[in-house]
Image: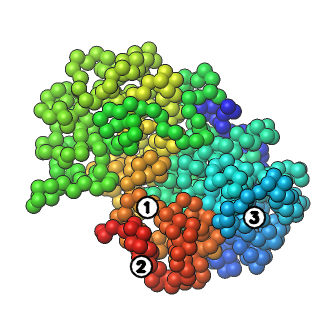
């Protein structure tokens, strides 16, 4: 198996071709470039110029502008001229859907065009088609005839191109042969790339976007594998998660998808797609990129004997085999550990932050879907009766003194586990710093745990390249066929909550996407935070910090599709095509549906980002005209052209009709 990155243990940027976009160099290990996309009407020149300037001043190195038809493509000249007149020379990108003529106009004006192979020539009608090989090849020739003129224009004018595949807009032709899969995404792009290479045009960047980080990561890895196999080289990669949404969830989903790839040195330019004003995307991009600015100088990690023969596939999801220990491992969803180590005293009210609300009148606990499974108290016991589903992890001495051995379980630090004379009959947690522990002692712990039906590992790493260090240790376990469950622990010392959110998401999410991890344990010291807020929501006390950590843990599990505990919103980031106020509408829909569990609701600004881009959503709310909404169940239209003033209520009615509604 050809590896998809330089190494699983040594950080290094993946070598890609160098591409020039205006005066900006991308690929070939140049800095990872950050970009965004305007949300204004492209025909409103001044509004687009002013929003572009706000994005540039926020740090955008490229700015994309939608050009859905010839008139918008032509107006790019006015936008570019006005920007240049004001002294801004940042490269512009034309975003093209459906309209080759618009692309050919734009390619003569701006520095880069983006085309989507799924709808540039092919059409998507959600039809199941059967092609013979001859018919399929005829379609490829039709694409060649329609796409080649754009390639030649780009080559003549020195214009760069992004071939941007989207998971949700694969053509009926691709779907008929490859299905709704990462392989289909890769082949969709490769068809266009082969045509460009035949014209000796190489100023190309590629992307494999999806609203599902798992699909997105697998597709990029497969694309790299395919390019290396077919061409012996890679083109630069633009990373992004489509329709990530807003607030913490949008940031977490983006950080998981983009961060997982950046952790392995993959990615030459990134865009974080949030349902917010585009300039707010840039700080998230910057926080992501700066994590890897000095990563090459991490402490060494024991290298794998044969990196092309790892014991799991990085191209498809399969959860690591782990034995069952109480409610951990096997087929159980990953557990969440809430870290109360810094809490001086634990009260009934303290548990509200982690999903447990005590009603004194009824003497009962109300337990939310986002309730933690364990709390870590270090050397403390809890001075009240705990809710039935919550258990305590504590130091061994505290455990020995605790009366309720059904509720309390010890955490042994490394070698303590080997030497312990007293252990729990049910669960024994073993904390291991995979970077600092002596490898001979680590192996002795592994051998003892392998035959201990009560053992659960808690892995973390103090190596700068911590995810790779923990991954290396887990690969070692898998090679030895040790099935002890593993809780992924991530501690952040970042000074802002935004940075912590990204670190937690990238490091824990990267492992969970590969099927590694039977639990998640996030920890920090809130007293070290300079800015204790994320996207406008403040976490200013220890109690609220617990809420932040708990909510982040559940959101990471949700985004990696490993534990579903709430409604997921697949919301496009808005652009000049949007037919209603996307941010306001997303907030309205979230307000009335966020109590539902396990639903995926897509909120799309227009038909371009509509039924296709929704991919695997259960229900869709799509702009179909000015002030008009079309509702979908899956990919089927169920209500057309509803007035936007009543559309949210109609969505609720649709949920009720399909038994997907629960009264709040």
Relative vertical location of residue 510 with respect to residue 148 in this rendering, above or below: above
The residue under the point 73% across, 58% down is 130
* Camera-nearest residue between 511 and 91: 511
Q: Is residue 71 left or right of residue 643?
A: right
Mark drawn on residue 599: 1
Q: Secondary structure at mark 3?
A: loop
Q: Taking 386 as reference, is 276 left or right?
A: right
Q: Residue at x 79, y 37 (%)?
A: 232
* Badge 1 density bin: few <14, some 14–19, many ≥20, Cα 10 Å: many
Q: Secondary structure at mark 1?
A: loop
Residue 99, quarter of the rendered image: bottom right
Q: Position of residue 342 (x, y in %)?
A: 27, 41
Residue at point 20% right, 46% down? 388
Q: Position of residue 430 (x, y in %)?
A: 34, 27
Distance from disc 2 to disc 1, alpha carbons, whole Å, reads: 17 Å
- In the picture, the quarter occupied by the N terminus is top right
Upstream in sequence: badge 2 or badge 3 = 3
Relative depth, front residue between 298 and 68: 68
Helix, strand or loop status at disc 2: helix
Q: Which residue is mark 2?
A: 649
Tell me the distance, in whole angstroms, between the alpha carbons under discs 1 and 3: 31 Å
The residue labelled by disc 3 is: 122
């Amino acid at each position: 198996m050809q590896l998809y990155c330089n190494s699983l243990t040594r950080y290094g940027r993946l070598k890609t071709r160098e591409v020039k976009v205006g005066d900006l160099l991308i690929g070939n290990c140049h800095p990872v470039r950050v970009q965004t996309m305007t949300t204004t009407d492209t025909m409103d020149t001044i509004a687009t110029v002013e929003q572009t300037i706000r994005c540039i001043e926020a740090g955008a190195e490229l700015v994309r502008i939608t050009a859905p038809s010839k008139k918008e493509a032509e107006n790019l000249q006015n936008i570019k001229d006005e920007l240049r007149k004001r002294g801004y020379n940042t490269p512009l990108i034309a975003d093209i859907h459906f309209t080759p003529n618009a692309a050919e106009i734009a390619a003569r004006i701006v520095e880069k065009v983006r085309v989507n192979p799924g709808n540039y020539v092919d059409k998507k009608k959600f039809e199941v088609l059967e092609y013979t090989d001859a018919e399929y090849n005829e379609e490829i020739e039709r694409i060649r005839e329609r796409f080649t003129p754009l390639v030649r224009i780009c080559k003549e004018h020195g214009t760069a191109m992004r071939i941007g595949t989207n998971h949700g807009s694969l053509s009926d032709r691709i779907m008929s042969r490859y299905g709704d899969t990462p392989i289909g995404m890769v082949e969709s792009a490769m068809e266009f790339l082969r045509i460009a290479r035949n014209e000796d045009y190489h100023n190309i960047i590629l992307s494999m976007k999806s609203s599902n980080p798992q699909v997105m990561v697998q597709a990029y890895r497969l694309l790299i594998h395919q390019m290396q196999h077919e061409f012996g080289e890679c083109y630069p990669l633009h990373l992004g998660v489509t329709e990530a949404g807003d607030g913490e969830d949008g940031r977490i989903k983006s950080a998981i998808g983009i961060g997982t790839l950046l952790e392995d040195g993959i990615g030459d330019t990134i865009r974080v797609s949030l349902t917010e004003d585009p300039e707010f995307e840039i700080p998230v991009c910057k926080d992501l990129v700066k994590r890897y600015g000095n990563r090459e100088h991490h402490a060494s990690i024991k290298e794998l004997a044969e990196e092309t023969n790892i014991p799991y596939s990085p191209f498809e999801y399969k959860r690591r085999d782990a034995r069952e220990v109480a409610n951990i491992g096997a087929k159980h969803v990953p557990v969440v550990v809430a870290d109360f180590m810094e809490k001086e005293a634990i009260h009934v009210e303290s548990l509200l932050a982690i999903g447990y609300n005590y009603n004194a009148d009824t003497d009962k606990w109300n337990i939310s879907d986002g309730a933690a499974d364990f709390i870590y108290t270090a050397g403390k016991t809890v001075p009240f009766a705990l809710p039935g589903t919550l258990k305590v992890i504590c130091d061994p001495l505290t455990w020995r003194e605790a009366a309720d051995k059904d509720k309390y379980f010890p955490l042994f630090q490394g070698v303590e586990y080997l030497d312990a004379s007293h252990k729990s009959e049910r669960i024994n947690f073993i904390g291991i710093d995979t970077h600092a522990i002596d490898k001979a002692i680590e192996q002795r712990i592994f051998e003892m745990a392998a035959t201990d039906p009560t053992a659960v590992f808690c892995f973390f790493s103090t190596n700068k390249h911590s995810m790779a260090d923990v991954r290396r240790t887990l690969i070692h376990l898998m090679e030895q066929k040790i099935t002890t469950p593993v809780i992924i622990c991530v501690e952040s010392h970042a000074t802002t909550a935004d940075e912590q959110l990204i670190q937690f998401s990238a490091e824990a999410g990267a492992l969970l996407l590969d099927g590694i991890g039977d639990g998640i344990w996030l920890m920090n010291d809130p007293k070290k935070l300079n800015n204790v807020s994320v996207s406008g929501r403040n976490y200013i006390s220890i109690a609220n910090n617990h809420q932040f950590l708990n909510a982040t843990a559940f959101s990471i599990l949700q985004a990696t599709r490993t534990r579903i505990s709430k409604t997921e919103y697949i919301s496009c980031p808005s652009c000049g095509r949007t037919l209603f106020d996307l941010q306001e509408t997303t907030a309205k829909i979230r307000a009335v549906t966020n109590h539902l569990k396990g639903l995926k609701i897509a909120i799309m600004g227009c038909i371009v980002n509509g039924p296709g881009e929704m991919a695997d959503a259960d229900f869709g709310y799509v702009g179909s005209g000015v002030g008009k909404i079309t509702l979908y169940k899956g990919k089927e239209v169920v209500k057309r052209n509803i007035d936007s003033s009543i559309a949210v209520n109609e969505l609720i009615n649709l949920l009720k009709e399909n038994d997907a509604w629960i009264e709040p």
